[in-house]
Amino acid sequence: MTSTAGGFTIPPPPATAAPRQYSARQEEVLDGLESLVLANGFRSLRLTAVGKRLNTSFATLYQLAPTRDELIALVVGRWYVRACASGLRRLSREREPVGRLRAWTQFGVAGVARTSRQFWQDAQAHEAIRNIVHRYSHYYTEVLREIVDDGIKGGAFRPVNTVLLATMWEASTTRLAAPEEIPGAQSLRQLSEDWVDLVLHGLLLDNET
């Protein structure tokens, strides 16, 4: 378990392979590819197009990963690792349950805002990427449940079934692939913000704002 401000503890992020050291140019390429994958998906992504778009060579790409699918998995996994680190830093600065819940859910919304419906559709259709998404989605909801459990114990939140809350939250991730099926959903970000708003106000006691 990892300690944060106020003695609150959270589970550690999913285990990953030993971190690699990348050159400045490799980091630049990975950042560029990350933006492409999140914004456009990856099912139809071709390395020739990536090379031209990022002004890089096949040699640089193959130094990062030996196959296209492994390169995509590297990019998606790296995105989640860095996103979790950022979210945990934000969480560590909060001392109250409401602040923690807002910080953690806002971090999640910010991450979703970078993605596209195509990315989520492609992720659901690709076993390796789907497994990465599920692993980190589960971790996100596990931390969420710990935050809410702590808030219930401290009297900040209504007593609710936090296992059910976490299960429903994690299941909502798959709905990101088809937001048009939800009436009034204007964007992935708006959909996420509305969901956070519903959960937060359902947890707060009558005297909370």
Image (tube, helix red, strand yellow):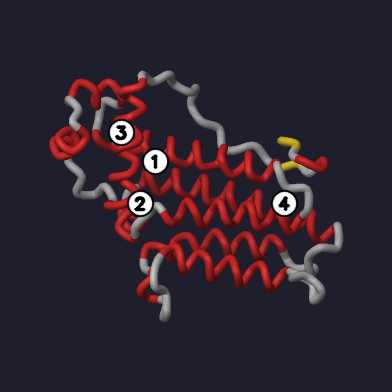
- Rendered position, 198 above or below 166: below
Residue 187: mark in rendering = none
Q: Position of residue 122 (x, y in %)?
A: 31, 53
Q: Quadrant of residue 74?
A: top left
What residue is drawn where x is 34% and y is 40%? 34
In terms of secondary structure, where does tag 2 sit?
helix
Task: Report crowding for label 1: few under 14, some 14 to 19, many 20 or more residues within 10 A (C-alpha).
Answer: many
N-terminal of the pair, mark 3 or mark 1, is: 3
Asked if the residue under mark 2 is in contact with the one under mark 1, i.e. CB atoms within 8 Å, the reply is: yes
Q: Is residue 110 left or right of residue 69?
A: right
Residue behind mark 3 = 71
Q: Earlier in the sequence, mark 1 or mark 4?
A: 1
The tag earlier along the polypeptide, 3 or 4, is 3
Distance Cα–Cα, label 2 vs label 3? 14 Å
Gap in Å between the C-alphas at discs 3 and 4?
33 Å
Q: Quadrant of the C terminus?
A: bottom right
Assign the N terminus to one quadrant of the image. Answer: top right
Q: Which of the pair 131/202 is nearer the observer? A: 202
Marking on residue 146: 4
Mark in front: 1 vs 2: 1
* Amino acid on which disc 3 is placed: Leu
Which residue position holds label 1?
A: 76
- Disc 3 to disc 1, C-alpha distance: 9 Å
Tell me where residue 63 appears, x and y as whole percent. 27, 21
- Dot 2 corresponds to which residue? 123
Given the image, on which type of amino acid does mark 4 rest? Glu
